[in-house]
Each structure stands twice: as C-alpha cells, then as structure tokens.
C-alpha cells in the first residue's frame, strides 16, 4: 500500500484550499479530500471520497457539501456492467461513463490521466459523470485529455451544436438556426436548440462592420453569462484577427 498526501490552492475567482490523501492498493485506489473556501461570503466545506478499482474505473463516490449551516450529501455507485446510481436511483443517462469528475476539485482529473497512460502528444476523449457544484447535479460530460510533455496535460470539456442556414443575403447577412446542441457545462445540454446565430455585414466609414447576435440567448438561460463572454472573445478577438490577417487562430478554450 502506498499513501500520498497533496494540498493545493485555487488561483481563480473562487477562494479555496484543498487537502487530498491518495491511497494506492493492488485492488485499486481511493481519494479522500476536503475543500475549504468561501463563496459570496458564505463558508464552504466539501468532503469527498472516491473509490477506484484495479482497472482504474470509478466504483463509488461519496460527497458531503456544507455551505453555511446547510448540509447536503450525494452518493454515486457504478457496477461492473457500467451502470450508475445516484443516491440509490439508477441513472441511464450516465451509461458509458467510466470516471467521475468532481467540479470542486482537480483531484479526480488525475484518474483518467493514470488510467489512459497517454504517450507524449497523445490525446483521448472520455465520458465522465460530472458532479456540478454548488448544484450537486450529475451529468454526462465529454472530456478530452492531451499529454503535452512528460509532466503536463491539457484538459478540456467538449460541447458541440448543429445548425442549418435559414437566411442568406449575399454580402449582407447569414443566419444559422441551432437544431441540436450538447452543452456539457449546463444542466440542460440542449439550451441552444431553437436559437439563431446571426451575422450582419454592412459598410461603415472605416470599411466593413460585422455585427453578431445570438438571438434567443437570454438572461434566463443558465449558460447566458458564460456564453456571452465566450462569444465576445470568439467574435471580437479570434474572428476579427482571422479576417484581418487570414491566419488561423488558436483555440481560446484549449
């Protein structure tokens, strides 16, 4: 048996410190950790325990979430056939997930890294049971892991959508309507379905003006803030540079 203890501090907008004990045995490993922090002035404590079998596949997850004086718990289990239960209730939507991903901790991202054993330059897309915080909801999420060098990996969640052209005026306007969507970062992956992506092109004193509107993306949607920020970066930065230089632009979210 080998035991290691690690600790780290988040450096983004959420203030949190974490301590995790990793215990490795012939029959698998366990992650036992505690996250301490605060959000909007409310103290937060999240305790978790993740069990993994000898093949590196998640078998059980226990979470206790304390926010102020409120306490909630969550239990996940995965059997040998790959079927999941959440608090004892079968969830068919999680079929195919091998790993769990706790949204409050990077510790669970080490599980697919250990299991996949990627060569440098290699990448693999997996499906994980993503536990979203603070909601404590569980959704299936496609996630891509890429090994950049001996010690560095790049992780990214994947989402996509399908559109069809519903309006086209040459040199003036084009509108795509979203007919299918799979957003991995919100509870309802189909939030975009039925919305329109509109590009208006018109002459201006400085040359040409391109105006983008995501029609139907309203403040009532869960992805509104994140999507608005992302579109600002993609259209205002990447697309603008592509038009001005003709050079392919890097993936802002890689």
Image (spheres, grey):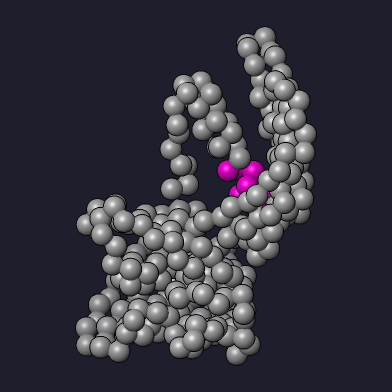
What residue is drawn where x is 62% and y is 80%?
92
Camera sees residue 72: yes
Q: How far across and how far down the image is residue 91, in percent?
A: 62, 81
- Residue 7 vs 123, above or below: the answer is below
What residue is drawn where x is 29% and y is 83%?
23
Q: How far across and how far down the image is residue 187, in percent?
A: 65, 65
Quick check: 204 left or right of 30?
right
Residue furthest out toward the top: 205
Quick check: 200 left or right of 47?
right
What residue is drawn where x is 43% and y is 80%?
58
- Tell me which segment is drawn in magenta: 223-230
- Examine the structure image and report whether residue 238 is included in the region drawn in magenta: no
Q: Is the N terminus in the top left, top right, bottom left or bottom right quadrant?
A: bottom left
Q: How many marks?
A: 0
Q: Nearer the viewer, residue 174 or 24?
A: 174
- Residue 237 vs 206, above or below: the answer is below
- Residue 233 vs 15, above or below: the answer is above
Q: Main secondary structure of the magenta part?
A: helix
Q: How far across and how far down the image is residue 228, in percent?
A: 64, 43
What residue is drawn where x is 26% and y is 59%?
119
- Examine the structure image and report whether residue 226 is included in the region drawn in magenta: yes
> In terms of image quadrants, where is residue 168?
top right
> In terms of image quadrants, where is residue 50?
bottom left
Camera sees residue 38: no
Q: How far across and how far down the image is residue 239, in percent?
A: 55, 31
């Amino acid at each position: 048996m080998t035991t290691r203890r690690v600790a780290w501090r988040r450096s983004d907008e959420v203030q949190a410190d974490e301590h995790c004990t990793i215990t490795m045995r012939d029959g698998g490993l366990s992650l036992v950790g505690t996250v301490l922090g605060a959000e909007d002035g409310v103290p937060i404590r999240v305790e978790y325990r993740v069990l993994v079998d000898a093949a590196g596949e998640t078998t059980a997850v226990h979470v206790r979430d304390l926010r102020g004086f409120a306490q909630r718990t969550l239990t996940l289990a995965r059997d040998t056939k790959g079927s999941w239960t959440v608090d004892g209730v079968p969830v068919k939507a999680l079929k195919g997930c091998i790993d769990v991903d706790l949204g409050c901790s990077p510790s669970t991202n080490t599980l697919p890294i250990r299991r996949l054993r990627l060569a440098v330059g290699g990448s693999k897309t997996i499906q994980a049971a993503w536990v979203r915080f603070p909601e404590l909801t569980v959704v299936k999420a496609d996630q891509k892991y890429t090994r950049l060098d001996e010690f560095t990996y790049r992780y990214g969640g994947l989402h996509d959508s399908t559109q069809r052209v519903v309006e086209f005026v040459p040199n003036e306007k084009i509108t795509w309507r979203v007919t299918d969507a799979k957003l991995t970062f919100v509870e309802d992956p189909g939030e975009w379905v039925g919305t329109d992506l509109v590009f208006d092109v018109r002459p201006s004193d400085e040359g040409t003006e391109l105006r983008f509107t995501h029609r139907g993306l309203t403040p009532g949607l869960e992805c509104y803030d994140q999507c608005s920020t992302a579109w600002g970066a993609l259209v205002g930065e990447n697309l603008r540079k592509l038009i001005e230089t003709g050079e392919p632009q890097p993936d802002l979210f890689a």
